[in-house]
């Protein structure tokens, strides 16, 4: 694993929308991840891991 991948995984664990923003930028994936994180952390983590 590269250090960038480790940082992405750490960001996903702390706050999934931030990790999605780092990978995808400001778009539909960020919007979806933000609302899923508000509904519950598990859905946000799943989408965050998928967007890696």
Image (cartoon, rainbow, N blue to C red):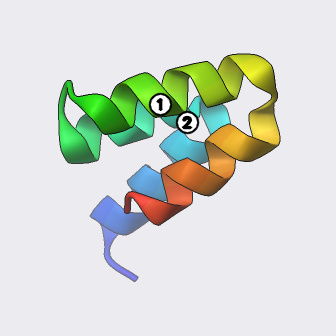
The residue drawn where x is 39% and y is 57% is 51
Residue 12 relative to residue 27: left or right: right
Residue 13, quarter of the rendered image: top right
The residue drawn where x is 41% and y is 53% is 8
Give coordinates of residue 46: x percent, y percent.
Answer: 65, 55
Q: Please name the residue that numbered disc 2 is placed on.
A: 16
Give coordinates of residue 3: x percent, y percent.
Answer: 33, 66
The C terminus - image quarter? bottom left
Q: Please name the residue that numbered disc 1 is placed on.
A: 32
As drawn, the residue found furthest toward the bottom would be 1
The residue drawn where x is 36% and y is 30% is 30
Disc 2 crowd, CA 10 A, few/some/many (<14, 14-19, 20+): many
The residue drawn where x is 22% and y is 29% is 27
Instruction: Report, in whole angstroms, how far the alpha carbon at label 2 lies from the one at label 1.
Output: 11 Å
Disc 1 crowd, CA 10 A, few/some/many (<14, 14-19, 20+): some
Q: Camera-side residue: 13 or 25?
A: 25
Give coordinates of residue 15: x percent, y percent.
Answer: 59, 29
């Amino acid at each position: 694993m590269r250090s960038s991948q480790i940082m992405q995984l750490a960001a996903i664990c702390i706050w999934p929308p931030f990790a999605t923003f780092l990978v995808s930028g400001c778009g539909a994936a960020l919007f979806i991840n933000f609302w899923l994180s508000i509904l519950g952390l598990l859905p946000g983590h799943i989408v965050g891991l998928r967007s890696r």
